[in-house]
């Protein structure tokens, strides 16, 4: 990856597979926060998803190589979006703090309002907050309330869910309204396994890769 300059958004994920919702969020964050680029950073071993239970079975995460190839295909024709392989090249378990330490530029970590409320469960969360600002994509089922109540982009975020989870007031964050597409990678995997239609959920090059590699069967 070339040396980074300017305002850089980081959208981390397992991307198993990357789908239209991921691309829409990356593009919205880039536009609303005036970012120079957004990197879809592919996790090597996502520590929060190891042994994840899906439909009473343990989902084996696809290889990092396959997931990176899908992200590369998804962003190939998208101006300002790039695939990131830092975490794969570094190896081992994936932690946001290690990734942010490797990167340069003015960094913005992109994440959903539901994930933001759990940031203090991350490894070394105070260092993560120091190294990056946050772009919080508000989910309709998990609103984040701005301090001044205006709800506009650029507000500091003081998110609180129904269970009382609260985003630390010291977090440097701006809020982006949507887009919210009700798409999940786990649902896509299930649909592919059941031979159901997914062409409206995935970028066409990703759909072709999945077919060529016979993934999720």
Image (cartoon, helix red, strand yellow):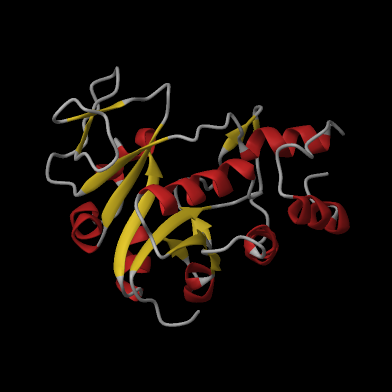
Q: Position of residue 202 (x, y in %)?
A: 71, 44
Find residue 14 and report its horizontal and vertical position in percent. Answer: 55, 52
Q: Report which quarter residue 94 is drawn in.
A: bottom left
* Residue found at x 70% / y 38%: 201
| Residue at x 41%, y 82% (from the top left corner) | 3
Image coordinates of residue 77 in percent, x first then y, are: 66, 63
Residue shown at 80% from the left, 51% from the top: 215
Task: Give the quadrant of residue 73.
Answer: bottom right
Q: Is residue 72 left or right of residue 85?
A: right
Left or right of 217, for residue 47: left
Please give left or right for residue 67 compared with residue 105 in the image.
right
In the rendering, at what x and y percent does residue 64 appear? 62, 63
Q: Nearer the viewer, residue 34 or 98?
A: 34
Q: Which residue appears at 43% of the width and 51% of the height?
A: 31
Q: In the displayed structure, would residue 110 be above or below residue 40?
A: above
The C terminus is located in which quarter?
top right
């Amino acid at each position: 990856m070339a040396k980074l300059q300017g305002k850089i958004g980081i959208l981390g994920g397992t991307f198993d597979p990357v789908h239209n919702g991921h691309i829409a969020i990356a593009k919205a964050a880039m536009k609303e926060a005036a970012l120079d680029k957004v990197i879809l950073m592919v996790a090597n071993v996502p520590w929060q998803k190891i042994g994840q239970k899906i439909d009473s079975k343990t989902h084996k995460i696809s290889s990092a190589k396959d997931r990176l190839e899908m992200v590369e295909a998804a962003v190939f024709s998208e101006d300002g979006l790039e695939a990131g392989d830092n975490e794969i090249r570094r190896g081992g378990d994936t932690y946001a703090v290690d990734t942010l330490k490797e990167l340069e530029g003015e960094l913005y970590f992109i994440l959903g309002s539901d994930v933001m409320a759990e940031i203090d469960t991350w490894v070394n969360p105070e260092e993560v907050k120091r190294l990056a600002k946050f772009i919080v994509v508000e989910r309709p089922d998990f609103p984040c309330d701005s301090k001044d109540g205006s709800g506009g982009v650029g507000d500091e975020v003081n998110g609180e869910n129904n269970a009382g989870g609260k985003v630390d007031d010291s977090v440097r964050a701006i809020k982006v309204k949507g887009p919210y597409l009700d798409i999940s990678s786990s649902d896509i995997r299930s649909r592919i396994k059941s031979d159901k239609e997914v062409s409206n959920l995935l970028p066409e090059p990703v759909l072709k890769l999945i077919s060529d590699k016979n993934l999720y069967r």
